[in-house]
Image (cartoon, rainbow, N blue to C red):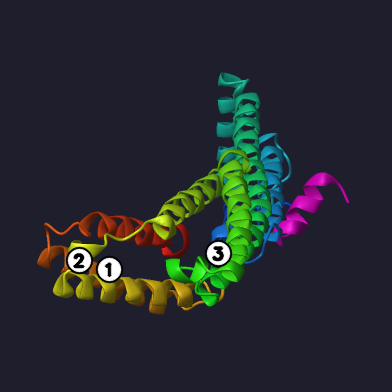
């Protein structure tokens, strides 16, 4: 089958169909196979869309170059008038068909470049997604183990056996930071370079958060420290739950995060001059970075 015949067959219409019929068939198929209508089809929809565009442009070129087109029967006299008018028009503009062909070629090239770029971008995003999921899996496992061993408590990790566990955690954490920072620069797609950057920024702040010491002695006034301690416990409980598994309920976690942030905001309003304010602010920053890296759509 020749190229034009194959194009008609791909669009599901009879060879020689007029342009309006071709256009209707093209629009129906484009609506059906457009990648935005098939987000889970991988590259299949993109490939099919490129084939449909190619077929449509091939038929338009064929018609513009004077190919046979099936038309509805016309009254004999009207047909003669139409034929004379067409001949007169062609005599006046002998290069019209060539201009039309050139215009269609340019449009086809633009369309093909667009879909090729979309296809390549989708492939890059899928490769980056695999790397993001793998690094996220390790990150969740490392931080979950940190909370499971209660290493977020300074007095616990200072014990000899736990100190070794904490050193192991720090080694793994350093690797996570290095990989996320590198991927924020080298990921193939812009979207995932940004996502790796947000992951790295969270890891930076979280590292400072777990190393920060609280004021001692006279600064630990009962009312102040009690409210701050309650907010901090809420935060640790949330982080422990959050990093238990990658398969979390996003809506539930966002609501839980809002409650924790509300605890710190209540403390900041109640004790604006407390030395614990800096610690509260830094904890809020950590939680906000977590939201941007893992919960924000």
Q: Which x, y percent locates residue 236? A: 40, 72
Tag on residue 37? 3
Q: Which x, y percent locates residue 114? A: 60, 41
SS of the residue under disc 2: helix
Q: Of discs 3 and 2, which sits in the foreground? A: 2
Disc 1: which residue: 261
Quadrant for residue 255, please give it.
bottom left
The CA span between labels 1 and 3 is 38 Å
Q: Which x, y percent locates residue 1? A: 88, 51
Residue 265, placed above or below residue 76: below
Residue placed furthest toward the right:
1
From this viewpoint, is residue 38 visible? no
Disc 2: which residue: 265
The CA span between labels 3 and 2 is 43 Å
SS of the residue under disc 1: helix
Q: Which residues are magenta?
A: 1-15
Disc 2: CA contacts within 10 A as few (<14), some (14-19) or many (>=20):
some
The residue nearer to you, when weighing 111 against 292, is: 292
Confirm or deny contact between disc 1 and disc 3 (CB under 8 A). no
Quadrant for residue 81, please give it.
top right
Q: Is residue 225 left or right of residue 132?
A: left
**Which quarter of the image is occupied by the C terminus?**
bottom left
The residue nearer to you, when weighing 160 against 56, is: 160
SS of the residue under disc 3: helix
The residue nearer to you, when weighing 44 against 245, is: 245
Confirm or deny contact between disc 2 and disc 1 (CB under 8 A). yes
The CA span between labels 2 and 1 is 6 Å
């Amino acid at each position: 089958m020749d190229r034009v015949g194959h194009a008609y067959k791909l669009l599901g219409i009879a060879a020689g169909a007029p342009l309006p019929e071709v256009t209707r068939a093209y629009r129906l198929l484009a609506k059906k196979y457009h990648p935005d209508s098939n987000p889970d089809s991988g590259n299949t929809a993109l490939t099919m869309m490129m084939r449909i565009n190619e077929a449509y442009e091939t038929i338009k070129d064929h018609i513009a170059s004077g190919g046979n087109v099936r038309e509805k029967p016309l009254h004999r006299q009207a047909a003669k008038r139409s034929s004379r008018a067409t001949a007169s028009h062609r005599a006046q503009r002998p290069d019209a068909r060539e201009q039309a062909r050139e215009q269609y070629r340019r449009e086809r090239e633009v369309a093909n470049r667009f879909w090729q770029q979309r296809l390549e971008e989708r492939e890059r995003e899928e490769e980056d997604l695999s790397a993001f999921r793998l690094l996220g899996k390790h990150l969740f496992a490392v931080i979950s183990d940190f909370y499971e061993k209660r290493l977020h408590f300074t007095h616990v990790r200072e014990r000899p056996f736990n100190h070794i566990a904490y050193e192991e955690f720090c080694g793994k954490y350093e690797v996570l930071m290095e990989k996320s920072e590198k991927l924020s620069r080298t990921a193939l797609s812009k979207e995932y370079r940004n996502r790796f950057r947000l992951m790295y920024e969270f890891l930076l702040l979280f590292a400072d958060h777990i190393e920060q010491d609280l004021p001692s002695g006279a600064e630990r006034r009962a009312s102040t420290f009690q409210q701050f301690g309650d907010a901090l416990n809420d935060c640790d409980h949330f982080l422990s739950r959050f990093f238990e598994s990658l398969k979390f309920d996003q809506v539930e976690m966002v609501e839980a995060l809002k409650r924790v942030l509300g605890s710190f905001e209540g403390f900041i309003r109640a004790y604006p001059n407390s030395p614990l304010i800096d610690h509260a602010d830094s904890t809020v920053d950590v939680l906000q970075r977590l939201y941007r890296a893992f919960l924000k759509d």
